[in-house]
Amino acid sequence: MEFLCEKNDLQESVSLVERIVATRSTLPIIGNILVETEKNGIKLSANNLEMALQLLIKAKVVKAGAALLPAKTLAGIVSKLPNTQIGFKLSEKGTIRINYDKSNFSVHTLPPDEFPVLPKIKDGKSFSINADLFKKMISKTIFSVSNSEDKYILTGVLMEIGKTSDDGNMRMVATDGYRLAKAAATVKLDKDIKASVIVPAKALQEMLRILERGSGEDVAVNVASDQIAFSYADVYLVSRLIQGQFPDYKQVIPKKNPIKILVDTRALFDSSSRAAVIASGSANVVRLEIKGKKIQLSAQTPDVGTIDEVLDAEIKGGDKLQIAFNVRLITDVLKVVEKPNVVLEFSESLGPGIIKEEGNEDFLYIVMPIRTQESA
């Protein structure tokens, strides 16, 4: 095996693939990256048995071949290489020579025979989605997944496809039990496809990084009963699905929320961020209260201090409200809001609140309040 490639192309691709490599495993072989030559480039593959990634890099192939390179070593070397053309040449003794300028590394490799084959979905349900739209849907839901393995079902994002309703024929929903985010869209389905699966957040996080590279192409999605695959440009990612019953999110959505508050997104985010400085010492509790034609955000921590901020707002449906939230759950959603204004909807001080983007019915965020002495 022998080829030449550009350092920048190599580093970007190796960094993506290396993230998939298992750091702790009883199977040492999956701690490696498979490097294979293709007609017009090289193919990098990683497989941790839960998720696998394969991508192509432009390269000038001198001699065909394949080898396994230790992922951490390869990533470390590539990150330190100068910005120049890099040459790889595999010797008969199983070492690979990495040439740059007038210098080189020599790294021991393994034969590729025992590396686990990347799964290919044969009988799945396929559809395509615009890359920018898919990126937005992931960004607006993934932050709400649970980080606790005790809530394993909630460490993934529910993906519903083909079940047409008022908010389109595709939905992505995530919740950690304290908040819920739902993004919806209408996508073109060639067939009568219906599926409801739970995609691990780790797979969607990697997909998000891949989409950040941009190519202008659609994402091809292939869903089976136990796996899901994404193809985008020269990248192929496949992951196991989480098995189990996702909570019925529709029952969580409040039916009536008469109090509606329209407020500037940036102003609310900045105010919440400042309040978080004080609230960090008291379980992140921040209070929201209607004050005439304005809303007030306040927080206090004994022996630290207090904060009171008043924001302009348009208020309909009520003039009395005092409710408390974990401020982190508020700032998290405001980071992904794209509209200049958000709508806050409330029913009562102990009922869940809703946050929407003004003029966008495809996104919904629900957050549970915190019981305090004032709201009790």
Image (spheres, rainbow, N blue to C red):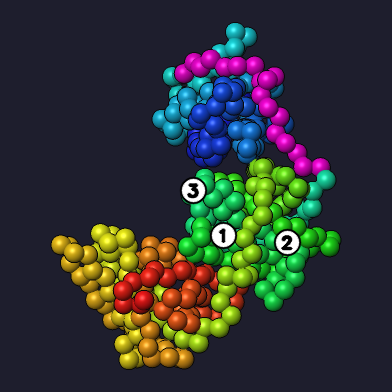
Residue, disc 3:
148
Q: Quadrant of the C terminus?
A: bottom left
Residue 107 visible: yes
Q: Earlier in the sequence, mark 2 or mark 3?
A: 3
Mark 2: amino acid: Ile
Left or right, residue 287 beside residue 55: left
What secondary structure is the magenta-colored segment mainly? loop
Give the alpha-carbon distance from disc 1 to disc 2, as whole Å.
Answer: 15 Å
Specify the segment rendered in magenta.
105-122
Mark 1: amino acid: Ala
Please name the residue shown 72% across and 36% down the image.
119
Please name the residue shown 57% across and 70% down the image.
252
Mark 1 vs 2: CB contact within 8 A = no
Please name the residue shown 33% across and 71% down the image.
372
Residue 235 x, y percent position in the rendering: 65, 43
Q: Earlier in the sequence, mark 1 or mark 2?
A: 2
Residue 242 x, y percent position in the rendering: 65, 47
Check disc 2: other Cα within 10 Å, few if <14, some if 14-19, many if 20+.
many
Give the alpha-carbon distance from disc 2 to disc 3, as whole Å.
Answer: 26 Å
* Disc 2 secondary structure class: strand
Left or right, residue 292 beside residue 358: left
Mark 2 vs 3: CB contact within 8 A = no
Q: Earlier in the sequence, mark 1 or mark 3?
A: 3
The label nearer to you, 2 versus 3, is: 3
Residue, disc 2:
161
Residue, disc 1:
174
Is the residue 207 above or below the residue 190 in the image? above
Image mark for residue 341: none
Check disc 1: other Cα within 10 Å, few if <14, some if 14-19, many if 20+.
many
